[in-house]
Image (spheres, rainbow, N blue to C red):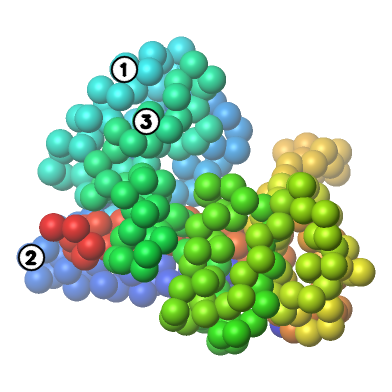
């Protein structure tokens, strides 16, 4: 059994990005600039955005953090999105989700210029990804692909079960694992809360990607010997022994599942660091105008 170390892989990739950025700047090119809009004071979002700013520093990017209180109107937020769309110095930007309930998230996502949509959530990027055209791929699925590739995990012809059907992970992951390239070329089954034979599907899987948001959902009796298990779950569960008062818990019961696996990603330290790393890769592509002129 080999543990997939997302933290070490992300650090390696950030060094590679930083070296390329310095080369671009040395040749008179522009330093990539990522902007992030943060609305309100959600604890998870605060941490995530802080980590994005630190990652920008590590990659040699310019970064801007734009903060609003959670009483901002939808129109005010859309006005800021339009302003960033037109700002030639900003190569890519993100609006950190979730947003307050009075703001329509999809409306905001669609207002972002797809050429600057480094989160990969705009319908144009989602559509291009689904048919295999160059685009910004949403960060978590892209991070998982990178881990599969860097660890040389075989995917061609393998049975891949994806637990969860969210627009952020489940659906794009299924689309990417089906495509005729590596990593991909797998036979994909998507299971969710209404799948009647979910356990049996998992037992047949060569690769399980768990993104269902339910702590310790995947147990040893659901996993066959030698399977590859990628745990996307990051649920905060109370833990009085921690300074923060909580700990991150994955969708997989790691201690009992790990001995059966050929490869397994832990929580934390698996997919999480790769999500931010993928955002950095998309920002570099945006700075180089790699996909869209």
Instruction: Return the x and y of residue 241 as percentages of the image width and height.
Output: 85, 43
In the image, residue 256 sits, relative to residue 287, either above or below, namely: below
The part of the image, by quadrant, that contains residue 122 is: top left
Q: Which residue in the structure is indicated by mark 3?
A: 108
Residue in the image at 45% along x and 24% along y: 104
Dot 3 alpha-carbon crowd within 10 angstroms: few under 14, some 14 to 19, many 20 or more = some
Residue 76 is marked as 1
Name the foreground residue: 157 vs 19: 157
Instruction: Return the x and y of residue 288 as percentages of the image width and height.
Output: 19, 63
The part of the image, by quadrant, that contains residue 35 is: top left
Q: Residue 165, can we see it?
A: yes
In the displayed structure image, the side of residue 191 where residue 63 appears, left or right: left
Residue 28 is marked as 2
Q: The N terminus lies in which quarter of the figure?
A: bottom right
Q: Residue furthest left?
A: 28
Instruction: Return the x and y of residue 139 as percentages of the image width and height.
Output: 46, 56
| Local SS, label 2 | loop
Q: CA distance from mark 3 to mark 1?
A: 11 Å
Residue in the image at 41% along x and 46% along y: 121
Residue 188 is marked as none
| Local SS, label 1 | helix
Instruction: Return the x and y of residue 220 as percentages of the image width and height.
Output: 89, 69
Q: Residue furthest front?
A: 196
In the image, residue 147 sits, relative to residue 226, either above or below, namely: above
From the image, state whether disc 3 or disc 2 is nearer to you.
3
In the displayed structure image, the side of residue 283 where residue 24 appears, left or right: left
Residue in the image at 22% along x and 69% along y: 22
In the image, residue 10 sits, relative to residue 168, either above or below, namely: below
Q: CA distance from mark 3 to mark 2?
A: 34 Å
| Local SS, label 3 | helix
């Amino acid at each position: 059994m080999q543990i997939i170390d997302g933290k070490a892989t992300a650090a390696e990739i950030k060094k590679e990005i930083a070296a390329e950025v310095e080369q671009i700047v040395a040749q008179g090119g522009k330093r990539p600039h990522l902007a992030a809009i943060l609305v309100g004071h959600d604890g998870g979002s605060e941490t995530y955005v802080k980590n994005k700013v630190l990652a920008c520093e590590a990659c040699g990017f310019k970064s801007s953090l734009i903060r609003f209180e959670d009483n901002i109107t939808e129109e005010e937020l859309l006005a800021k999105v339009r302003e960033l769309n037109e700002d030639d110095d900003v190569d890519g930007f993100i609006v950190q989700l979730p947003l307050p309930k009075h703001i329509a998230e999809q409306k905001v996502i669609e207002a972002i210029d797809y050429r600057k949509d480094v989160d990969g959530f705009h319908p144009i990027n989602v559509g291009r990804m689904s048919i295999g055209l160059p685009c910004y791929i949403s960060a978590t699925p892209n991070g998982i692909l990178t881990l599969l590739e860097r660890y040389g995990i075989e995917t061609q012809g393998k049975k891949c079960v994806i637990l969860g059907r969210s627009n952020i992970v489940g659906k794009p992951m299924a689309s990417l694992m089906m495509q005729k390239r590596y990593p991909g070329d797998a036979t994909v089954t998507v299971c969710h809360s209404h799948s009647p034979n979910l356990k049996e599907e998992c037992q047949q899987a060569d690769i399980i990607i768990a993104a269902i948001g339910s702590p310790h959902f995947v147990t040893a009796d659901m996993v066959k010997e030698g399977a590859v298990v990628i745990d996307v779950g990051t649920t905060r569960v109370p833990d009085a022994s921690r300074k923060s008062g909580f700990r991150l818990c994955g969708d997989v019961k790691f201690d009992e599942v790990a001995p059966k696996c050929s490869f397994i990603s832990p929580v934390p330290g698996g997919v999480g660091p790769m999500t931010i790393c993928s955002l950095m890769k998309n920002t570099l592509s945006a700075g180089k105008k790699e996909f869209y002129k």
